[in-house]
Image (cartoon, rainbow, N blue to C red):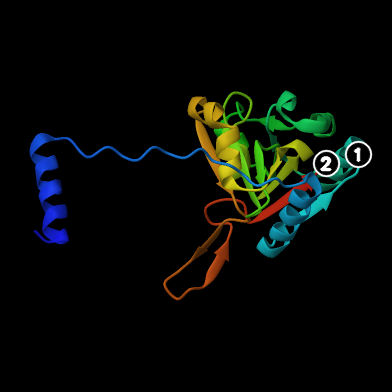
Amino acid sequence: MSARAAVLARLAAAQRTARLPPAPAAKPFVSPARSGSECRDRFVRELEALGVDCHVEASAEAVRARVRALVAGKQILSWDFDQLPYEVGSVLGGALRGAAPRDDQARAEIGVTGCHGAIAETGSLAVLSGRGCSRTVSLLPPVHVAVVRAEDLLFSMGEFFARNRERIASTAGCTFITGPSRTADIELTLTLGVHGPGRVIVVVGP
């Protein structure tokens, strides 16, 4: 019997019995060691390549000052303040939250969130939606400001999944944000901001 015939015979037998051959055991994910500064530097480079404005601040006070300047004079939609790092909520004034009426949220000019992972390899933000962390905040306003803590930085997507396996399983949704929203028509004309924010700003803290 040829190799091809043998494979087809196995598949036919599996279909008749409704049993498939067992899958090989999965190997545990092992991430190479990366320093915090290496992850941060790679993350910043990837953000710049994606057209994301990135600000690296040396203190919590500097993070708050940066966010205050970015949101000045704008209608803000925000995660609940206790979900934002570096006490950023203290500079957001009368910001709307995810529980606000839908029409009010739709008028927001800028959304402010934290993140649950910052993937250095791709410049992606991982955001888990749930209580106090409305997904609308990062998707609806035309501008998204994300505040990243040093401990949020991971080198790879695999490292993020390995570290947050249980949390991801229990959350309402997991969103990966890699630069501004982009789409192109049949003529390959690129347009920003059609399916999400057209501008993303990241503030990295100490």
Q: Quadrant of residue 141?
A: top right
Picture quarter with the C terminus: top right
Q: Say which element carries label 1.
A: loop
Percent position (x, y) of residue 143?
68, 50
Question: Counting other residues with Cα less than 10 Å from the Cα at mark 1, is it few (<14), some (14-19), or many (20 or more)?
Answer: few
- Quarter where residue 67 is shown: top right
Please name the residue that numbered disc 1 is placed on: 59
Mark 2 is surrounded, within 10 Å at the Cα level, by few (under 14), some (14 to 19) or many (20 or more) other residues, namely: many
- Indicate which disc, 1 or 2, sits on the residue closer to the N terminus: 1
Of 18 and 121, the residue lying toward us: 18
Quadrant (top left, top right, bottom left, bottom right) of the N terminus: bottom left
The one nearer the camera, 10 or 136, is 10
Look at label 2 and name its amino acid: Gly
Q: Residue 205 shows which numbered tag?
A: 2
Query: Is 103 positioned to the left or the right of 84 in the image?
Result: left
Q: Is residue 182 visible?
A: yes
Q: Residue at x 68, y 52 (%)?
A: 200
- Element at label 2: loop
Task: Give me the residue at 72% from left, 47% from top.
Answer: 34
Marks 1 and 2: CB-CB under 8 Å? yes
Q: Residue at x 61, y 28 (%)?
A: 100
In this picture, is 39 found above or below 159?
A: below
Q: Front-most of 86 and 95? A: 86
Toward the bottom, the furthest residue is 187
The residue sitting at the front extreme is 1
- Relative placement, left or right, of 106 versus 96 is left
Estimate the x, y position of residue 205 in percent, counting from the top left: 83, 41
| Residue 61 at x, y percent in the picture | 92, 36
Amino acid type, label 1 = Ser
Marker disc for residue 159: none
Quarter residue 6 falls in: bottom left
